[in-house]
Amino acid sequence: MRRARLGILISGRGSNMLALADAVREARIPNTEIAIVISDQADAAGLVKAQERGIETLVIARRGRQRAEHDREIVAALSAKNVDLICLAGYMRLLSPEFIAAYRDRILNIHPSLLPAFPGLDAQKQALESGAEFTGCTVHFVDETLDGGSIIRQQIVDIHPDDSVDLLSERILIEEHRIYPEVVSLVLESIVGTSIDE
Ligand code: GRF
């Protein structure tokens, strides 16, 4: 059986990407390699962190193109790398329907709220401003909707009376780094059972 191949899309800091890389290295995501990390931002801090770990990186900037054209280039890069599963990790662009069709049920995302609550940008701020007593994070399949695909795993995080967006985000991030690798491992196991055998 060959190793499963992950493609990770980032736009910024890349801490979830690193959490996945650590889990791969420590075989908490077993029998897997990170085939490529792609960023739509040339200055994404996560790119350097990936390179420091010897992971191949690629910048595919939008350069004023339409979403569909930009996504076609990303899909071509992912398929050239024979990627089995794509993890969005702080990737700040919506995917085109063509991208999703090319990798249906093979694209995961992590979002810093208990979806369907607080989709979109600034989820932690939305949670604080709502007066909720708890929020959390969600790993879900990506479909054509904004943060609306099937939910795989969620983790609750309490909101403290004196919380700030930064403090809450930090506590949520700890849980993101824990559950994302667990879900990737589970999903890959099901893929391995069906189509990675050579
Ligand atoms: C995380 O909070 C993730 O849930 C959201 O964007 C943030 C990315 O952080 N989608 P990082 O780049 O993984 O550090």
Image (tube, grey):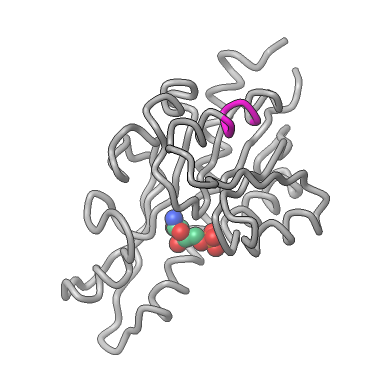
Horizontal and vertical percent position of residue 179: 49, 52
Screen quadrant of the N terminus? top right
Q: Could you tell whether 161 is left or right of 71 in the image?
A: left
Tell me where residue 46 sits by quadrant.
bottom right
Instruction: Name the residue rendered at 55%, 22% in the picture.
Output: 191
Horizontal and vertical percent position of residue 147: 32, 45
* Depth order, front residue of 82/156: 82
Task: Farthest residue to the left: give it.
Answer: 131
What secondary structure prevails in the magenta region?
A: helix
Screen quadrant of the C terminus? top right
Q: Is residue 49 visible?
A: yes
Horizontal and vertical percent position of residue 20: 63, 50
Horizontal and vertical percent position of residue 69: 49, 31
Q: Is residue 42 above or below residue 2?
A: below
Q: Is residue 119 above or below residue 151?
A: below
Q: Is residue 177 visible?
A: no
Instruction: Name the residue rendered at 83%, 50% in the picture.
Output: 54
Magenta span contains residue 164: no
Magenta span contains residue 74: yes
Boundaries of the magenta span: 73-77
Task: Farthest residue to the bottom: give it.
Answer: 162
Instruction: Name the residue rendered at 48%, 40% in the picture.
Output: 65
* Depth order, front residue of 171/142: 142
